[in-house]
């Protein structure tokens, strides 16, 4: 049986002018790779920085040993990069996603319990509500007979999940529209600013700065309203939900410092959870549906699994571990299209990685996109093959070469949460619907804050048994 090879950006020619390379980088982080980039241990690009045009290096690391060194063994020597700092702070303050050192340590100790496995189980019912709404919306869209922008639908679903699991209330349609549109603006500008930050160009003077800050304010306002309501109820001793993520964040006490998040910190952290938790899941879900549409045999197996495990029952937490093939489809989608395609780290003091000297001030980029497609580790690295995770070869490749949620101290604390919401909604959609590729459309993968399709993900959707 031949495997489906999904689209990836054209590789750059071996010789290309610096200006063309820079323009490609501004469009998408994936646009600068040459075919050889998928095999190398480490690549290097030089940038001239403002104001004195000194050279600054960016190292792209893909050798698994070096990846472990940067992300796990010597994570403190390679702190989270400040590239996106100015822009992200407008949205999330100095929250866990951008902070470093002891500030980050305290935040992480307070955020981890809010996303631990037990809590993920507690919020299952909230995820189910959102998945039920998303399935009903998709069924209604199928009935129109028009192709569906499944990426938009998955963004709406993931935003709803985050809202419901944090606040125990759904996001209104009107707020969802506003927030999703604002994220679109924010994401476009933030990425370009991050890349221009390689040349130390200050964000404030770049085009789009004002637009992105306005978008950030819209998002923060949507979060601030339910947060202030909850804090007021809490302070007044009125009954409030006790098993959602906000309850855990409000009630959390850092065992080291004995402190808790105050109101402003809560707003920053929730804005960050919203950013980190909805775009990423939405991206991976949209790619999963696209890949299933292009590989009907895989889709039929996901449907069969959903029928066998869920039947006509209301999905329950216990069903999740029996949806193993659905989970492998989602994992394979994240291998081919890792939502966070680049993990940027700074090298403030200068260092050595392998045999290479890393000058002080360089940026070290770890790229799941490149690592997940390395020919030496993966058989048919560009092909969609969810079965690879079940065989010994795939398991060996995964160890060290597969990290969509990163690894080490800054590993994604929302991984279990994301897997649960994804498996749940994919199974619920597959129980009712069939997705077909639209012959008039091919996705164009681009890496900005998350890896998405520049022209959206558009599929034809049918109720099962119809079409
Ligand atoms: C498929 C979905 C997701 C993927 C692929 C993903 C991936 C990642 C990756 C790669 C990082 C590390 C980034 C870096 O160090 O540069 C990260 C960090 C983070 N993620 Fe996720 N994530 C997902 C969903 C979520 C969800 C649902 C939440 C919360 C509900 C979440 C919360 C976070 C937080 C708080 C961090 C920052 C951790 C730290 O710096 O200590 N993520 N995620």
Image: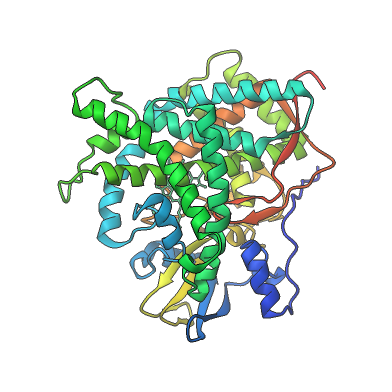
Which is more toward the observer, 346 or 73?
Answer: 346
Q: Whole-percent x and y of residue 295?
A: 76, 38
Residue shown at the point (34%, 58%) measured from the top left: 99
Q: How many marks?
A: 0
Instruction: Indicate the quadrant where residue 191 lies.
Output: bottom right
Q: In the visual, does 188 lie left or right of 16? A: left
| Residue 231 at x, y percent in the picture | 26, 32
Q: Position of residue 387 (x, y in %)?
A: 65, 42
Q: Residue at x 57, y 40 (%)?
A: 282
Which quarter of the figure is the N terminus placed in? top right
Vertical position of residue 127 compared to residue 412: above or below: above
Q: With 391 as the anchor, is 264 left or right in this view? A: left
Q: Quadrant of residue 155?
A: top right
User: Residue sitting at 73 percent across and 66 percent down?
Assistant: 11
Residue 45 visible? yes
**382 shown above or below 79:** above
Q: Is residue 434 above or below residue 103?
A: above
Please state if 127 lies on the left or on the right of 22 as rendered.
left
Residue at the extreme left of the image, as rendered: 258
* Observer able to see residue 32: no
Residue 218 pos. (x, y %): 46, 43
Quadrant where the C terminus is found in the figure: top right
Residue 283 vs residue 330, the one in the foreground: 283
């Amino acid at each position: 049986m031949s495997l489906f090879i999904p689209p990836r950006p054209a590789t750059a020619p071996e010789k290309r002018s610096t200006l063309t390379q820079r323009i490609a980088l501004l469009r998408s982080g994936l646009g600068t790779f040459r075919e050889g980039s998928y095999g190398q241990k480490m690549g290097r690009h030089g940038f001239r920085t403002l104001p004195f045009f000194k050279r600054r290096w960016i190292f792209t690391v893909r050798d698994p040993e070096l990846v472990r060194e940067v992300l796990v063994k010597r994570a403190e020597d390679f702190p989270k990069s400040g590239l996106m700092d100015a822009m992200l702070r407008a949205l999330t303050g100095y929250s866990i996603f951008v902070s470093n050192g002891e500030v980050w340590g305290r935040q992480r100790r307070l955020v981890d319990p809010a996303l631990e496995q037990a809590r993920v189980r507690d919020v299952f019912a909230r995820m189910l509500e959102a998945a039920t709404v998303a399935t009903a919306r998709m069924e209604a869209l199928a009935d129109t007979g028009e192709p569906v922008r499944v990426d938009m639908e998955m963004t709406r679903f993931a935003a709803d999940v985050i809202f419901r699991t944090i606040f125990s209330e759904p996001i209104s349609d009107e707020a969802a529209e506003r927030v999703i549109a604002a994220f679109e603006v924010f994401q476009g500008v933030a990425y370009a600013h991050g890349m221009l930050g390689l040349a130390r160009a200050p964000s404030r003077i770049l085009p789009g700065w004002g637009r992105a800050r306005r978008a950030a304010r819209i998002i923060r306002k949507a979060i601030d309203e339910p947060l202030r309501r909850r804090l007021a109820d809490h302070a007044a001793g009125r009954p409030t939900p006790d098993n959602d993520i906000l309850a855990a964040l409000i009630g959390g006490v850092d065992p080291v410092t004995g402190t808790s998040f105050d109101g402003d910190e809560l707003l920053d952290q929730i804005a960050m959870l919203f950013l980190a938790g909805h775009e990423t899941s939405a991206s991976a879900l949209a790619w999963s549906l696209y890949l299933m549409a292009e590989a009907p045999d895989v889709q039929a197996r996901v449907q069969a699994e959903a029928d066998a495990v869920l039947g006509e029952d209301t999905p329950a937490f216990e069903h999740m571990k029996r949806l193993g093939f659905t989970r492998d489809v989602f994992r394979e989608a994240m291998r081919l299209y890792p939502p966070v395609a680049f993990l940027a780290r700074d090298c403030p003091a200068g260092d050595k990685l392998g045999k290479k000297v890393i000058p002080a001030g360089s940026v070290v980029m770890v790229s799941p996109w490149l690592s997940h497609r390395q020919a030496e580790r993966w058989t048919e690295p560009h092909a969609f093959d969810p079965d690879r995770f079940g065989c010994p070869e795939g398991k060996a490749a995964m160890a060290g070469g597969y990290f969509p949620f990163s690894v080490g101290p800054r590993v994604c604390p929302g991984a279990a949460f994301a897997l649960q919401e994804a498996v749940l909604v994919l199974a619920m959609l597959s129980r009712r619907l069939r997705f077909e590729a639209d012959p008039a459309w091919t996705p164009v993968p681009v890496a900005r804050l998350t890896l998405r399709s520049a022209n959206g993900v558009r599929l034809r959707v049918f109720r099962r048994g119809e079409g």
